[in-house]
Image (tube, grey):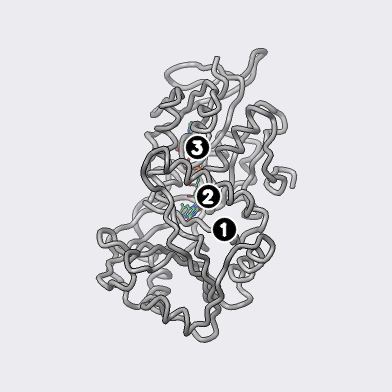
Amino acid sequence: MYDLAVIGLGGVGSQVAFHAARRGAHVVGFDPFGPPHDRGSSHGRTRLIRLAYFEHPGYVPLLRRAYELWHDLSHRVESPLLYQVGLIYAGLPQSEILKGVARSAREYDVPIERLSPHDAVQRFPGLVVPEEANVLFEPTGGYLRVEECVEAGLHGAQLLGAELRTYEPVESWSRDGQGYVIRTAQDTYRATRVVLAGGAWAGQLLPSLASKLQVIRKTLHWFDTRDPRYLESNGFPAFMAEWEGKQYYGFPADQATGLKAAEHSGGEKVANPDQLDRDERPEDAASTRAFLKSWLPGVSDRQTEFSACMYTMSPDGHFYVDHLPEEPGVVFAAGLSGHGFKMASVLGEILTGLALDGFSPLPIDFLRLAR
Ligand SMILES: Cc1cc2nc3c(=O)[nH]c(=O)nc-3n(C[C@H](O)[C@H](O)[C@H](O)COP(=O)(O)OP(=O)(O)OC[C@H]3O[C@@H](n4cnc5c(N)ncnc54)[C@H](O)[C@@H]3O)c2cc1C
C-alpha cells in the first residue's frame, strides 16, 4: 500500500511527487509518457514567472512561496531553474494586464517601476513603444526552464524513494474499504490517497469536472534574431503586452534558439488532447509576427522553431485546487488556464498538504471548486 498515488507527472505532478517524497511518504506516480515530454502543457524550454499577478492578487502569497521553492529546487539540483531577468508589462493604462499588475503590486507591495515610453526605449534598446502605451517593469519577473523543472522534481522524488511508472497510463481509479485502487494496463496498485494532476486530460480523469474544463490549442514560435539588443546576455528582459485586444508574451533571445514569443489570448478548442493538431498552420504565427514587427522590429520574421501546446481553461481563468467533494482522499489541480507552470512548485506543496494533512496553510480558498 502506497501513501500517495500521483496521477500525471508533468508540471504539477512532478512537484507533488517531490514534495510528498520529501515528507517521507511512500509515493507512486504514473504517466502515459516519459516526462518531461512535449505531449501536454509543460514543454517549449521556458515559462514566464512574475509576482505582480494581473490575473488576481490572491496568487501573490502563493507566488512568493513558489519562488522560494524553485530556488530551493535549483540548489538541490545544483543548476539554476529560475532566471530573474526582469519583465516588462506594456499596454494601454486601462488594459487588463496593466490594471491588474498595478493592483497586485499595490496590495502586496511588489516592487514595480513605472517607465515612460521614452525611458523604456532608452533602457531597453530595440523596443518600440507607442506614445499612448504605459510601461511597468518588474525586476522580480523572469522565466523558468520548464523541462529542467519537471526533470528536477522527478529526479528529486526518485532519489527520495518515489516509484515512477512512466509509459503507464492510469486506466481507472476507484475506492474500496481499504483505500484507492489504481489500475493500469500493466498492474493494479493501492494507495491511501490520490493526487490527480492530469493537465489537459483532467476531464478524462475527473469526469465530474469535465464540463467545467475547456482545452485549447496554443502555439509557440521562435524567431531568428541576429540583433544583439534582444539578447538576454545584453540585459533584454521577458515581456508581456496587451495591444489591440490581444495579449502577447515573450522571452529574451539567446544565440542558439533566437527569440521565443507567442499570443496568450485566443486559441482553438481541442475536443480530445490525444488528437491535438501539432502541425503548424500558416495563420499560427500571424498575430505574433505583426506584434513583433511593431514592438521589436529588429527581430527577423524568419521562424526557426515551432511547437503546439495546450491550455486547460476553467470558466473564470483561475485554477481549481481542492479535494474532490465526493472523495475526500482525492485531491486535484485542474484548469490551470495557461498560467500554472510558475506555480507548479507551490502547487506541489499545497496538494501534498491537502492529501496528507487534509489542509494547506496557504490561502487557496479563491481556488476551491465552490468559490
Ligand atoms: C504554449 C503555452 C505557454 C505557457 N506559458 C506559461 C507561462 O509563461 N507561465 C506559466 O506559468 N504557465 C504557462 N503555461 C501554462 C503551464 O505551462 C501549464 O499550466 C502547466 O504546465 C500545466 O501543468 P500540468 O501538470 O497541469 O499539465 P502537464 O504538464 O501537461 O501534465 C499532465 C500530465 O498528465 C499526464 N496524464 C495524462 N493522462 C494520464 C493518465 N491517464 N494517467 C496518468 N497520467 C496521465 C500527461 O501525460 C502529463 O504528463 C503555458 C502553457 C502553454 C501550453
Label 2: which residue? 67
Identify which amino acid the numbered label 2 is placed on.
Answer: Tyr
User: Secondary structure beneath disc 2?
Assistant: helix
Q: Residue 14: percent from the left, percent from the top? A: 47, 36
Q: Residue 340: percent from the left, percent from the top? A: 54, 49
**Badge 3 density bin: few <14, some 14–19, many ≥20, Cα 10 Å:** many
Label 3: which residue? 15
Labels 1 and 3 touching (C-beta < 8 A): no
Considering only order in the chain, which callout, 3 or 1, is on the residue closer to the N terminus?
3
**Badge 1 density bin: few <14, some 14–19, many ≥20, Cα 10 Å:** many
Label 1: which residue? 51
**Badge 2 density bin: few <14, some 14–19, many ≥20, Cα 10 Å:** many
Mark 2 to mark 3 CA distance (whole Å):
13 Å
Identify which amino acid the numbered label 3 is placed on.
Answer: Gln
Considering only order in the chain, which callout, 2 or 1, is on the residue closer to the N terminus?
1
Q: Residue 301: percent from the left, percent from the top? A: 31, 71
User: Could you say which quadrant of the image residue 293 lies in?
Assistant: bottom left
Mark 1 to mark 2 CA distance (whole Å):
9 Å
Question: Measuring 50% from the left and 62% from the top, which residue is drawn there?
Answer: 264
